[in-house]
Amino acid sequence: MNRKFELTEKKEVGGLTLFRIKAKIAFGNVAKGELGGWIEKEGNLSDSGDAWVSGDARVSGDAWVSGDAWVYGYAWVYGDAQVSGDAWVSGDAWVYGYAQVSGDAWVSGDARVYGYAWVYGYARVYGKLKLTSRLCSFYDFEFDWQVKLWHKKEEEFEAEVKRRLKKRTD
């Protein structure tokens, strides 16, 4: 039995039945009785930690929010996506497919993180960015060209490491 939240009112959205959550206990920055966002089933939100879905945010499918992560605003996490650690997903951002947002990463604005993308560390993804691959950094990314440049430099670095390792063995 879930001790942290309960499912309350329901609504239909695009063929899905979603339930508004309500805190049964106080935890983190959530007060007892506080209404949260919308989830499809209890398995979408961890019963441990301070993870929470608030506002009009939605979590559905086999997506999971855990740790101290927050999904809020009008964000939508679905499919097999995971949001964990101290990560935040907000605004109109979507995280879906097998994507993962973890650590202290933020995804916000109209950003889309999907497929097998992995955003972690202190990465910031926002604006109208679409991300389908790995991103970990101390930098902020708002535009596709920034991510493409990051990956180009990452590929160049990996190629240089391989070249130097090969040179050692020759």
Image (tube, rainbow, N blue to C red):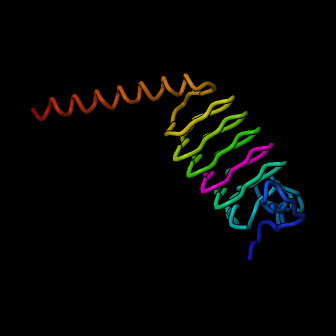
124 and 48: which is toward the camera: 124
Give the number of callouts: 0
| Image-quadrant location for residue 65 | bottom right
Q: Position of residue 114 (x, y in %)?
A: 59, 44
Q: Position of residue 88 (x, y in %)?
A: 68, 44
- Residue extent of the magenta highlight: 70-86
Quadrant where the N terminus is found in the figure: bottom right
Q: Residue at x 35, y 27 (%)?
A: 157
- Percent from the top left, x then y, of residue 36? 84, 55
Give the image quarter of residue 11.
bottom right
Task: Give the left or right position of residue 96, taking residue 149 as reference.
Answer: right
User: Residue, x 51% and y 47% (percent of image)?
Assistant: 116
Q: Name the residue furthest bottom.
A: 1
As drawn, the residue found furthest toward the left would be: 170
From what the image shows, is residue 124 above or below residue 24?
above
Asked whether, in this view, residue 136 is left or right of residue 17, the answer is left
Q: Is residue 113 magenta?
A: no
Q: Above or below — where is 113 with respect to 67?
A: above
* Residue at x-position 75% and y-position 55%: 52
Horizontal arrangement in the rendering, residue 96 relative to residue 40 (left or right)? left
Q: Main secondary structure of the magenta part?
A: loop
Image quarter of the C terminus: top left
Report x, y in % for residue 22. 85, 62
Residue at horizontal 76 percent and vertical 39 percent from the top? 92
- Compared to 105, does 149 lie above or below? above
Q: Is residue 105 above or below residue 98?
A: above
Residue 51 falls in which quadrant of the image? bottom right
